């Protein structure tokens, strides 16, 4: 059996080191240091932790089975039984996430040393716990409003993210915050809520997410900026999609797009540029369509959207090169 590729590689490296020593490029002591560093790097190759992957899949199957079991008999359960099932499931998810992270002492916020795979699994479990907790509280309130449940779910998601930051945990916080805003509006104006009210509320929520991310409150800064930008743009479009109020729709969208591009000029995060260009591409054709009362036709709108996209992309490139002239 011939030598392996690794053996041939080690021999070639050893020969190269000897050649460098013979030519006086490096000393014998330096060659020893290089050899030891290469050996250490080889011994620290990342290995696939199949036990963690199996635990991830197993936990998902158990959770899916539990939901399937509950779904088949949910209508037959009493209110107390539903609350008990959801509460037990929430506690189990929190306990499972804590164990997967290595115990409560390992969940030390930003200073944690939990491996990436375990952190992702823990984030998923804690995020699911926030959902089941919200459902349990909503089942308990029994008033048709999801405000209290989503607020408690947000608290659980935020506590999990503070204890062990993860991308999934941040998405759970964002989803629960959106649920809180929507539920609060429905609670305050059950019959009078309109697209403008809802849109401005979500726009403000997106700006708050952007501020929290920009000032470093959130560990996953880029993800937070992306969630905030997307929420603000979606909120700006709500008056148009809800009430047909195109003036408010494209006006707010243009304002958000300009704000995102202006912020990108100061903070070079690509997601700001993407959503800023997207906002301009959406808003300008809407504005032209409204001003002309639809006289330009659908084909002209498509051509206009393409032209606006090209111009917005050119502006984005100019903004990028303004901070990176070599690009």
Image (cartoon, rainbow, N blue to C red):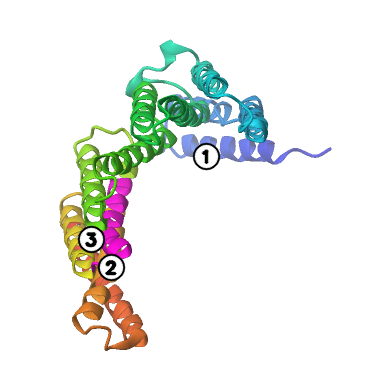
Residue 265: x, y in percent?
17, 56
Position of residue 95 in the picture relative to residue 198 (left or right) = right
Disc 3 versus disc 2: nearer the observer? 2
Badge 3 is on which residue?
Answer: 320
Give the magenta part as a residue range. 225-245
Q: Residues within 10 Å of mark 3 (few under 14, many from 20)?
A: some
Check disc 3 and report its element: helix, strand or loop: helix
Q: Quadrant location of the C terminus?
A: bottom left
Indicate which disc, 1 or 3, sits on the residue closer to the N terminus: 1
Name the spot of residue 63 as percent of width and height, x first: 61, 29
| Residue that label 1 marks | 19
Q: Is residue 129 left or right of residue 227?
A: right
At a point 58% along the width and 38% down the height, the residue shown is: 15
Residue position for label 2: 244
Residue 286 drawn at (x, y percent): 26, 74
| Image position of 146 (left or right of 118) | left
The answer to whether the residue labelled 2 contacts the one labelled 1, judged by CB atoms less than 8 Å apart, is no
Q: Residue 137 or 31: which is nearer the viewer? A: 137
Q: Is residue 48 visible?
A: no
Q: Is residue 235 magenta?
A: yes
Residue 139 in view, yes or no: yes
For the residues labelled 1 and 3, the Cα–Cα distance comes to: 46 Å
Dot 1: what SS? helix
């Amino acid at each position: 059996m011939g030598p392996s590729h690794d053996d041939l590689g080690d021999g070639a490296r050893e020969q190269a080191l000897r050649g460098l020593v013979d030519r006086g490029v490096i000393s014998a002591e330096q060659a020893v240091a290089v050899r030891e560093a290469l050996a250490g790097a080889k011994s620290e190759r990342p290995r696939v932790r199949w036990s963690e992957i199996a635990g991830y899949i197993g936990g998902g199957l158990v959770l899916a089975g539990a939901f399937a079991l509950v779904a088949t008999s949910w209508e037959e359960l009493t209110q107390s039984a539903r609350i008990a099932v959801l509460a037990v499931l929430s506690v189990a998810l929190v306990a499972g996430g804590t164990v997967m992270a290595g115990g409560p002492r390992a969940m030390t916020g930003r200073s944690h040393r939990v491996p990436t795979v375990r952190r992702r699994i823990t984030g998923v479990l804690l995020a699911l716990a926030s959902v089941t907790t919200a459902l349990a509280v909503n089942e308990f309130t029994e008033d048709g409003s999801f405000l209290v449940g989503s607020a408690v779910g947000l608290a659980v998601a935020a506590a999990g993210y503070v204890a062990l930051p993860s991308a999934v945990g941040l998405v759970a916080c964002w989803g629960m915050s959106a649920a809180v805003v929507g539920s609060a509006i429905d609670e305050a104006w059950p019959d009078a809520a309109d697209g403008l009210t809802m849109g401005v509320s979500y726009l403000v929520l997106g700006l708050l997410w952007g501020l929290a991310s920009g000032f470093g409150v959130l560990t996953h800064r880029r993800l937070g900026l992306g969630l905030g930008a997307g929420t603000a743009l979606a909120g700006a479009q709500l008056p148009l999609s809800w009430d047909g109020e195109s003036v408010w729709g494209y006006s707010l969208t243009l304002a958000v797009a300009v704000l995102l591009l202006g912020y990108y000029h100061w903070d070079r995060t690509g997601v700001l540029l993407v959503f800023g260009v997207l906002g301009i591409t959406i808003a300008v054709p809407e504005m032209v369509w409204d001003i002309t009362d639809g006289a330009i036709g659908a084909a002209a709108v498509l051509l206009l959207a393409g032209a606006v996209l090209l111009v917005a992309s050119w502006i984005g490139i100019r903004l990028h090169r303004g901070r990176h002239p070599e690009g």
